[in-house]
Amino acid sequence: MRGPRIRLATPADLAVLPALEAAADRLLEGVLGSRPLPAPEPPPAVGPVLILVAGNPPVGFARIDEVDGQAHLEQVSVHPDAAGRGIGRSLVQAALDAARRRGYESMTLCTFEDVAFNAPFYRSCGFDVVAEPGGALAGLRHHEAQLGLDDLGPRVAMRNRL
């Protein structure tokens, strides 16, 4: 069975992504406990390079930023009603392909270490844990800790060498 088509987000898509992210976050909150995730707050000096969506209307999206001159997978969200159909994996693969086409040598991300659809999932997509992140990636991890994400569970930075 083929999933929804992955495409670049349009301005109309951008309006529905916050609700999609909130729905996906409820799934994560269910795994992490009853404490809600902190409100998204972008780190200073980081902005989206590319936003990909799955479906029309979108049932999932991937946001790619640039950190330390490399692609950074800031967010992958799939609506719970569409979970388990390979949409997240398709979005990650499309993000990796887009980063490769744009000339990036690697893609990083930050995620929960022990959540099955986080670090273990990203390992299956070719990402490895960065033991000691440096530069802006370390700054991003510090920003996440300040937001309270580390209080919800252990987090790691990961990298996929393109």
Image (cartoon, rainbow, N blue to C red):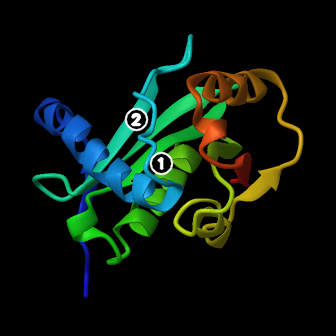
Evaluate if marks 1 and 2 touch, with contact meaning CB atoms under 8 Å apart: yes
Look at 33% across and 52% down and name the residue there. 26
Residue 29 is left or right of residue 139, and the answer is: left
The mark total stands at 2
The picture places residue 85, in percent across and down from the top left corner, at 32, 77
Whether residue 4 is visible, yes or no, is: no
Q: Secondary structure at mark 2?
A: strand
**Mark 2 crowdedness (10 Å alpha carbons): few <14, some 14-19, many ≥20:** some
**Which amino acid is tagged 2?**
Leu
Look at 40% across and 66% down and name the residue there. 90
Residue 15 is left or right of residue 137, and the answer is: left
User: Splitting the image into 4 quarters, where does residue 116 fall?
Assistant: bottom right
Mark 1 vs mark 2: in front: 2
Query: Which comes sooner in the sequence, label 1 or label 2?
Result: 2
Residue lying furthest right: 132
User: Splitting the image into 4 quarters, where does residue 8 fall?
Assistant: top left
The picture places residue 71, in percent across and down from the top left corner, at 60, 37
Which quadrant of the figure contains the N terminus?
bottom left
Q: Secondary structure at mark 1?
A: helix
Is residue 110 depicted above or below 31 in this figure?
above
**Mark 1 crowdedness (10 Å alpha carbons): few <14, some 14-19, many ≥20:** some
| 149 vs 123, nearest the viewer | 149
- Label annotation for residue 17: none
Residue 11 is left or right of residue 136, and the answer is: left
Is residue 111 depicted above or below 47 in this figure?
below
**Which amino acid is tagged 1?**
Ala
Look at 48% across and 61% down and name the residue there. 31
Whether residue 86 is visible, yes or no, is: yes
| Residue labelled with disc 1 | 98
| Residue labelled with disc 2 | 50
Look at 45% across and 31% down and name the residue there. 38
Residue lying furthest top: 45
